[in-house]
Image (spheres, rainbow, N blue to C red):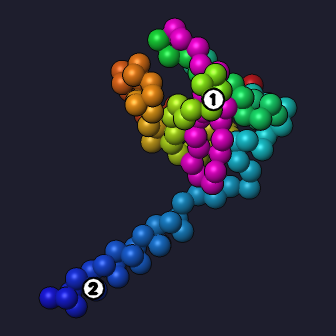
Amino acid sequence: MKKIICLALAAVLCMSVMLVGCTGSYDKSPAEYTGVRWIAPDYSIRFTPDDGGKGTYYFNEKKYNVRFDFDGDSFTVYDTDKNDTRLFEGDWTYEENERLYLFNISFNKNDYKEMKENYMEFITLRTE
């Protein structure tokens, strides 16, 4: 029985290593673009890589001054007005025409009670 469990764990470990190798890697992260601003179609999210990733996020008519931080295939958005408290995080990839697709978004609902009603899980941004 122990051998079967060990073999199953080894198989799971091998599969996870293979899946990690399948994630997209890009020559350039969204933070490395110059002379552009990333913006959502509804203008709820916008940030400028040239300005250290600073931008704004709007939810329920409230404006949050934020900073986007990209690390590999994930990102974190910090609220600059609240001592860089994490507002939300997720993963990113590019779609056709260099559109930035943010997905698996999860909000910091402990520090931001109003985000309990925010159901955004993904959004596409374009350059402006």
Name the secondary structure under disc 1: loop
Where the C terminus falls, by quadrant?
A: top right
Q: Is residue 2 above or below residue 15?
A: below
Identity of the residue drawn at 65% across and 36% down: 68
The residue sitting at the bottom extreme is 3
Identity of the residue drawn at 60% across and 25% down: 82
Name the secondary structure under disc 2: helix
- What type is the residue that disc 1 sits on? Asn
Q: Which mark is residue 40?
A: none
* Image coordinates for residue 114, horizontal then vertical, percent: 41, 19
The residue sitting at the left extreme is 1
* Image coordinates for residue 108, horizontal then vertical, percent: 45, 33
* Image coordinates for residue 62, horizontal then vertical, percent: 53, 11
Q: Is residue 21 above or below residue 64?
A: below
Identity of the residue drawn at 31% across and 79% down: 9
Q: Is residue 28 magenta?
A: no
Q: For the image shown, how many numbered marks are present on the structure?
A: 2
Q: Which mark is residue 6?
A: 2
Boundaries of the magenta span:
61-79
* Image coordinates for residue 126, horizontal then vertical, percent: 66, 30
The answer to whether the residue labelled 2 contacts the one labelled 1, judged by CB atoms less than 8 Å apart, is no
